[in-house]
């Protein structure tokens, strides 16, 4: 099957305008005749549900948390990009488009990204009108800062809590629609399966997490805004509950999973401190605006507790014995190189024995220069809350000594394949935000995730779903269809099976084991041999899981172990596609670094002749190799170049 | 280090509930409080017993999911720290800890340490927003807002909705939570049009949910993990009075 992007041809500048005119529009009086399911209440889900509610659709909105305000978008720290050019530093829609395509290492669809850059400005207007308290200058106008991979200041922010403020804006818009009765909200309700009827996505099966009740929901269309999958690594910056279940269940029902090997390893996280660790904490990339990254030049100066290396206190290491390796290797972008480049370089210096932390996996992020240049007060105003967060976790003060940071899994660029309308290959199934694959290519630039989630939810889906619904017209929906009964039975059987194993290992022990295998073999640096070994290991872990996992309690009750078991079972299937994708992509691009494919300087080397495509995987059954479909990427506006930040 | 935990166990809202004692052994000072509980739960799971239920998600102090009382203090009582950010270096070998859920009639216990805080959502649904349709906004820089006002609005908007204010208040009042949202929107020019209808609708819903009144103990501010100041309550009361004096809803 050839995948059609359905992107309008012709001038990219006018493509979205023309497309909006060409699409079908549902008469305002008829909108109430359509029911739309939205799974997820993060930036993409809440903004989509609120906007469709405003338009008059009946919206059913689900989340597994106790409140829609808890979705993990809330934890995004740094900011949101927009091409406002309020700083007068030569920014433009085209420059944001160009930076995003280049930052993604030329593996994203041009038309989607151009639309994203156009819409970026509307998002800022919308958020300000909602009362989102962005940072302001003394004159009362909006402030901006810079982020990695860009030479302009285009990032809008609310201290280190931009995701929280934007999510609360969307949550409040959603709350208004709940009050108005256009949106019904179902918290503590987790999607367990997608229901496809006559080839169209027409409903979902859910489990209520307090009562255990399994329910069927029918609709005219299903929207998944269920976030990313990097918790497959077990340790990541994602929330504990973030999972792949919704998108993987959709994959099992025929939706294609695109580019699963594109994962982002964020360079600035707090290093691992012990085996009990449950998650890793991000320190916003904005810190790299004023912090300088370095390691001791001499490996004997590096502190590594596990290797019993005492090293030297960072304050005792003179300038001449420090290696500011990013500034040295990338004089133009310096500490503001994109995330994939910063992460890989941290790994390189640590692998060479210069790392500083409990396990030798850490580099310094030093604010000494910033204190001299700006003063402690100003630095505190910019980053005080992040410094407090760091101190709570490590017991160390960034005012007294450099922070220690190390890369950690943070974001999934891969996701369900969607066309220009954000519709998957299953008609009626739309996928938004991190859950889709569309806009970030092989690497996402900082402050672009919030932009994409809100662009998809507020400004794209509400139009494109109308086109689909308009073509279909009002249809009868029924939870009595055979597909509902069948899906419900499968969900119930699976839950009962998990409870009946009564094995000797905890759910988390399997998750940790899977995560470590992926981190070591499909993490920041990958090679064919290790990926092949990994592909042998995953089915073994999966088989043991289904024989030896221990899930106490019952199905008809609040059972947090059962919730985790279902999610880990899906990760154990999904991980295989991720490794297969990483192995077939015989090139390095963005976050996917294959050591066999590097330039002489050690930078990622793409292969545009053979791999300028999106890999979309079709499920064929557990223990069956999925089929790969390709969407060829055409670049009409951006010239493919070797990405350079030198 | 080794600790003794007395943990509240309750099967559901109608169950009476009781304390159960657990030993947490070999605890590292670098562990977070929730990671310490994870280890206790691992052992329970392996023994085929029900693990202790507590709510958590981001584990970095921003989602607002987590929260329970540790020795009578919300989130353990460290200034501006949620219980997921609380680390075991704050405790000593041999400590005995009493761990119990938020106690408030408006927050019924779901199970063990997990409570139902949907009352907070309903308070926001009553009017905690600016009514602006998607796509109808003007340019973001069209209305300058002084940095001071923007910063104050942000300080109120930083609320994570965890419920520590309610749990710490002898009256189980939700006025810090409600006041924070009213203050956030009421300070900004965008929030002026609905300022007085908002304060009336939200406080009416707050009362209907069964939260108590404020009697100036200021425990809410002391235990708020985001440092929301009690002045937001004063400002909310001022707006409510103005709204009543105006004698109409807008």
Image: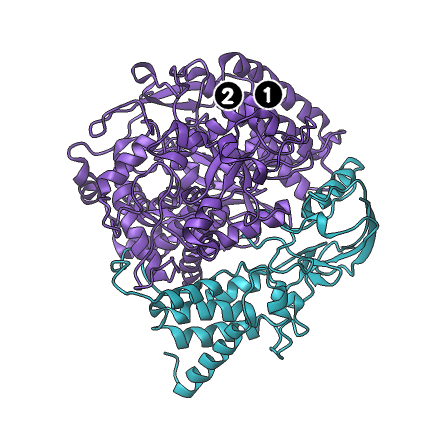
Chain colours: A purple, B cyan
Residue B95 as seen in the image, left or right of residue A16? right
Quadrant where the C terminus of chain A sits is top left
- For disc 2, the marked residue is A579
| Secondary element at tag 2 | helix
Picture layout, residue A613 above or below residue A52:
above
Picture coordinates of residue B199 (x, y %)?
45, 75
Mark yes or no: residue A41 visible: no
- Identify the mark nearer the N-term, 2 or 1: 1
| Closer to the camera in the image, A216 or B1 | B1
The disc numbered 2 marks a residue on which chain?
A
Residue A589 in sight in this render: yes
Residue drawn where x is 33% and y is 33% of the image: A332
Instruction: Write the residue at 49% across / 34% down.
Output: A294
Check disc 2: other Cα within 10 Å, few if <14, some if 14-19, many if 20+.
many
Q: Which residue is mark 1?
A: A538
Residue B115 rendering spot, x and y as whole percentages: 65, 58
Relative vertical location of residue B125 with respect to residue A225 in this rendering, above or below: below
CA distance separating discs 2 and 1: 9 Å
Q: Quadrant of the N terminus of chain A?
A: top left
Mark 2 touches mark 1? (CB < 8 Å): yes
């Amino acid at each position: 099957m050839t995948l059609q992007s359905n992107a309008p041809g012709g001038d990219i500048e006018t493509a979205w305008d023309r497309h909006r005119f060409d699409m079908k529009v549902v008469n305002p009086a008829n909108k109430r005749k359509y029911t739309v399911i939205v799974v997820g209440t993060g930036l993409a889900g809440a903004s989509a549900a609120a906007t469709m509610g405003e338009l008059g659709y009946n919206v059913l909105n689900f989340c597994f948390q106790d409140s829609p305000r808890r979705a993990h978008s809330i934890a995004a720290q740094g900011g949101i990009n927009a091409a406002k050019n309020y700083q007068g530093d030569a920014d433009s829609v085209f420059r944001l488009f160009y930076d995003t395509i280049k930052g993604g290492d030329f593996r994203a669809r041009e038309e989607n990204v151009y639309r994203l850059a156009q819409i970026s400005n509307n998002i800022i207007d919308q958020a300000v009108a909602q009362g989102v308290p962005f940072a302001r200058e003394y004159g009362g106008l909006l402030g901006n800062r810079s982020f990695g991979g860009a030479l302009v200041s285009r990032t809008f922010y609310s201290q280190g809590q931009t995701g929280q403020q934007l999510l609360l804006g969307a949550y409040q818009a959603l709350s208004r629609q709940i009050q108005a009765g256009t949106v019904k909200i179902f918290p503590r309700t987790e999607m367990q399966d997608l229901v496809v009827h006559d080839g169209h996505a027409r409903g979902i099966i859910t489990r209520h997490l307090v009562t255990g009740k399994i329910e069927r929901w029918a609709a005219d269309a299903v929207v998944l805004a269920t976030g990313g999958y990097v918790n497959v690594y077990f340790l990541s910056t994602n929330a504990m509950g973030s999972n792949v279940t919704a998108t993987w269940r959709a994959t099992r029902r025929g939706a294609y999973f695109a580019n699963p090997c594109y994962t982002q390893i964020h360079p600035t996280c707090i290093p691992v401190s012990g085996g009990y660790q449950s998650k890793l904490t991000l320190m916003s990339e904005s810190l790299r605006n004023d912090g300088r990254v370095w390691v001791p030049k001499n490996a004997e100066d590096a502190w590594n507790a596990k290797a019993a290396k005492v090293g030297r206190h960072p304050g005792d290491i003179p300038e001449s014995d420090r290696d500011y390796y990013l500034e040295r290797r990338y004089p133009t972008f310096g500490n503001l190189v994109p995330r994939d480049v910063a992460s890989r370089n941290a790994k390189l210096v640590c692998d060479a024995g210069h790392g500083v932390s409990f396990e030798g996996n850490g580099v310094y992020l030093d604010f000494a220069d910033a204190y001299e240049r700006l003063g402690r007060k100003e630095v505190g105003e910019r980053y005080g809350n992040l410094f407090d967060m760091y101190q709570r976790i490590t017991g160390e003060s960034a005012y007294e000594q450099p922070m220690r940071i190390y890369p950690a899994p943070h974001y999934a660029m891969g996701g369900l394949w969607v066309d220009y309308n954000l519709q998957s290959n299953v008609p009626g199934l739309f996928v938004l935000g991190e859950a889709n694959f569309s806009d970030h290519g092989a690497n996402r630039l900082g402050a672009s995730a919030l932009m994409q989630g809100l662009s998809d939810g507020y400004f794209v889906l509400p139009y494109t779903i109308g086109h689909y619904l308009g073509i279909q017209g009002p249809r009868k929906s029924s939870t009595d269809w055979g597909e509902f009964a069948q899906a419900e039975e499968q969900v119930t059987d699976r839950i009962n099976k998990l409870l009946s194993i009564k094995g000797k290992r905890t759910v988390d022990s399997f998750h940790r084991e899977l995560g470590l295998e992926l981190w070591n073999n499909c993490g920041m640096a990958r090679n064919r041999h290790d990926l092949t070994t990994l592909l042998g290991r995953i089915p073994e872990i999966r088989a043991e899981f289904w024989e030896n996992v221990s899930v106490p309690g019952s199905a008809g009750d609040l059972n947090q172990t059962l919730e985790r078991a279902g999610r880990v079972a899906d990760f154990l299937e999904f991980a295989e596609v991720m490794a297969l994708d990483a192995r077939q992509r015989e090139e390095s691009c963005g976050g996917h670094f294959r050591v066999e494919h590097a330039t002489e300087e050690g930078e990622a080397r793409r292969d545009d002749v053979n791999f300028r495509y999106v890999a979309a995987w079709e499920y064929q059954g557990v223990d069956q190799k999925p089929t790969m479909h390709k969407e060829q990427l055409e670049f009409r506006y951006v010239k493919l170049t070797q990405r350079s930040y030198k | 280090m080794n600790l003794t935990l007395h943990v509240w166990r309750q099967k559901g809202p109608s169950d009476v509930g009781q304390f159960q004692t657990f030993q947490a052994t070999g605890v590292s000072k670098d562990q977070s409080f929730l990671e310490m509980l994870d280890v206790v739960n691992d052992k329970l799971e392996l023994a085929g017993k029900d693990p202790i239920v507590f709510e958590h998600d981001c584990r970095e102090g921003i989602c607002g999911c987590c929260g329970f009382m540790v020795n009578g203090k919300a989130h353990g009582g460290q200034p501006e720290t949620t219980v997921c950010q609380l680390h075991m270096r704050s405790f000593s070998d041999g400590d005995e800890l009493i761990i119990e859920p938020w106690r408030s009639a408006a927050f019924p216990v779901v199970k063990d340490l997990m409570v139902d805080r949907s009352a907070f959502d309903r308070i926001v649904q009553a009017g905690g927003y600016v009514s602006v349709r998607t796509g109808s906004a003007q340019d973001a820089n069209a209305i300058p807002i002084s940095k001071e006002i923007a910063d104050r609005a942000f300080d109120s908007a930083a609320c994570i909705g965890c419920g520590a204010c309610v749990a710490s208040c002898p009256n189980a009042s939700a006025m810090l939570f409600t006041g924070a949202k009213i203050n956030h929107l009421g300070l900004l020019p965008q929030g002026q049009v609905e300022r007085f209808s908002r304060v009336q609708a939200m406080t009416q819903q707050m009362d209907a949910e069964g939260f108590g009144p404020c009697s100036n103990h200021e425990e809410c501010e002391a235990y708020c993990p985001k440092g929301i100041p009690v002045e937001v309550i004063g400002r909310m009361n001022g707006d409510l009075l103005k709204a009543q004096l105006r004698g109409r809803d807008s």
